Image (cartoon, rainbow, N blue to C red):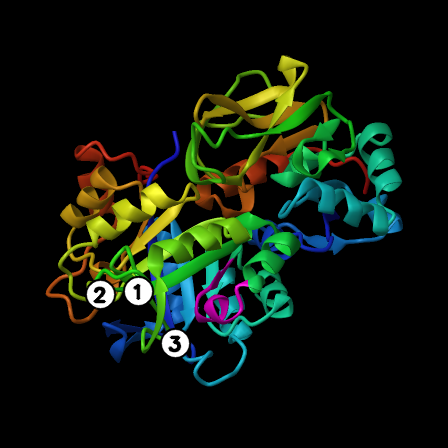
Amino acid sequence: MIGIIDYKAGNGPSVLSAVAHLGYKAELVNTPERVLQMTHIIMPGVGSAGATMESLKELGLIDAIKTAVLENKVPFLGVCVGMQILFDHSEEDDADCLGFLPGQVVKFDREKVRVPQMGWNKVTFSENMGYKAEDDYFYFVNSYYVVPEDKSHIWGTAEYGGLFTAAVCKGNIYGTQFHIEKSAKAGLSLLNGFLSLKGGRL
Amino acid sequence: MITKRLIACFDIIGDRVTKAVKFQDNIDVGPAEDLASVMYDEQIDELIFYDITASAEKRRINIEVVKKVAARMFIPFTVGGGIKNLEDMHEALKAGAEKISIDSMAVRNPGIIKEGALAFGSQCIVLSTQVKRTQKSLKIPSGYEVYIDGARLATGMDAIEWIKRGQDLGAGEICINSIDNDGTLSGYDIELMQMAGEAVSVPLIASGGAGKPEHLKELFSKTAAQAAIISSMLYSPRMERNYKVAEIKEYLMKENIHVRPIRV
C-alpha cells in the first residue's frame, strides 16, 4: 500500500487524488504503525517547515519515518515542504529538520525576485539519477529552497534569480520542490515513475 | 525562468459557471465540473473558483462543488467566496484547493489574512480585491477605490494602500480586478497594474477586461503582473468567438512572452 502522510495543513487529499488517478491504491496515514506498513511513502507539503515538523512530532511519526526510510529503504517522496524537511535545517521558523540529506533550506532574495515564487517553471533533470525524468514545466509555490551540501544529491534544477535545486534524489529518497500533484501531465508522469519503483514492504 | 500564468476564473452559482458583465446580469455557461475538465484538457495553467453568492446569502462555500472540480484536474486551484474563518479555509483546502481567496471578508476583518497565513502559509492566501477608478483625493491618492460585496459597496479605501497592507499582513499573492474594465473586452487596466507592481513584491494577478490575446501581451510586457485571468475569451457565450488556450499561448510565445508551452 502507498501511504500519504496526513498531517495538519498538509494537502494529502490532493496527492491522494493524483495517485488514485494513476490507478494506484493509496491511503492517508497518520499513525506510526501504518507508516511502517507502507510500500511507498509520500510526504506532501503545504505551509512552513517549522509547523510541518511540529505536526509530525505531535503525531509521533518521526521515528517511524526514520525507520521506514533509512532502515527499511522504502521509496520516499517529499513534496515541497515535504522535501525541505529532508535536510538538516530550515531558515523558515529556524527549524531543525529530519537531516536525511545534508544541507540547508534558505529563502529567495526579495531584492532579486518576487517572493514567493509562484507558477510554472522549467526543470532540467540530471541523467543517471533516480528514475528517468524528462525536462518539463512544473508548478512551484515556494519562498524557500534547498541547498544540498552534497551536489550529487541534486536531481533537477530550475532558474529563479539564479539556479536553484528543484528536485533531489539519494537512493530510495526523492524530493521535488514543485507540486508534483498539481503539475498536470508532467507531474503525473513523474509521480507515476516513483510509484512504479519496487516497494520496500508489502 | 518562471512563466506567465493564464488563469480561468469560474463565477459559480449553485454548481454552474456563470458569466457577468461588471458584476451583473450573470448568464449560465455550464456545469462547473465539466468546464473544469475542458479547461484542464486545454492546458490552462490554473483555475480560480468563486462561489459568488455565498457571501450575500450568508452561507459557507459549496464544498461539494469544490470537491467535484478538484477531482477533475491536477493544476493549482484557488477557491473563494463565503470564507469567514480558519475553519472555512481548512474545509476548502481539504476539499482539494491549494489557495484561498479572500475579498470582502478581508476588508471587514483584515486579521483573517494574518491568521490564514500563519495557519497555512502565505502561499495559501490570495487577497482578491475589486477596484474602481475615482477622483484622486487625500484619502484615495492612487485614484483607485476598493469595493466589496460583489463590487456593490464602496469602502472609501485606497486600493494601492490596501494591497500593501494585505502583503504586510501575509497575503502571498494579490489578485486585482478592475470593475471598470470587467467584461468590457477592452483590455486590462494597465495603469492600475503598473502602480500595483511598484507597490508590492508578491505575485500579482490581473483581472478584468481581456478580450483578445493582444491584451495579454500588453499586460505582460508593460506591467509586473505574473498572471492574468481570462474567462470571457475562453467560454463566454456573449463572445463572437471563444479562444482556445493553445492559440493564446502560441500567440504569446511568438511575441516573446514566456508561457508554459502546450504539451503535445
In this orientation, does residue B44 appear?
A: no
Does A7 sit left or right of B117 as displayed? Answer: right
Which amino acid, by three-letter code, is at mark 1?
Glu
Q: Earlier in the sequence, mark 2 or mark 3?
A: 2
- Cβ–Cβ under 8 Å for marks 1 and 3: no
Which amino acid, by three-letter code, is at mark 2?
Thr
The subunit carrying tag 1 is B
- Residue at horizontal 45%, vertical 58%? B127
In the rendered image of this protein, does residue B60 appear above or below residue A77?
below
- Cβ–Cβ under 8 Å for marks 1 and 2: yes
- Residue at horizontal 35%, vertical 37%? B3
As drawn, the residue found furthest toward the left would be: B240
Q: Does A15 appear in magenta?
A: no
The subunit carrying tag 3 is B
Alpha carbon separation for disc pair 1 and 2? 7 Å
Does A90 sit left or right of B244 as displayed? Answer: right
Which region is colored magenta? B100-110
10 Å neighbourhood of mark 1: few (<14), some, or many (≥20)?
many
Residue A165 rendering spot, x and y as whole percentages: 55, 24
Residue A89 rendering spot, x and y as whole percentages: 73, 29
Alpha carbon separation for disc pair 1 and 3? 14 Å
> Could you say which quadrant of the image residue A81 lies in?
top right
The subunit carrying tag 2 is B
Image depth: mark 1 or mark 3 in front: 1
In this orientation, does residue A183 appear?
A: yes
Please, what secondary structure does the residue beneath circle 2 have? loop
In the rendered image of this protein, does residue A164 appear above or below residue B225?
above
Which amino acid, by three-letter code, is at mark 3?
Asp
On the same chain: label 1 and label 2? yes
Can you identify the residue that label 1 sits on?
B145
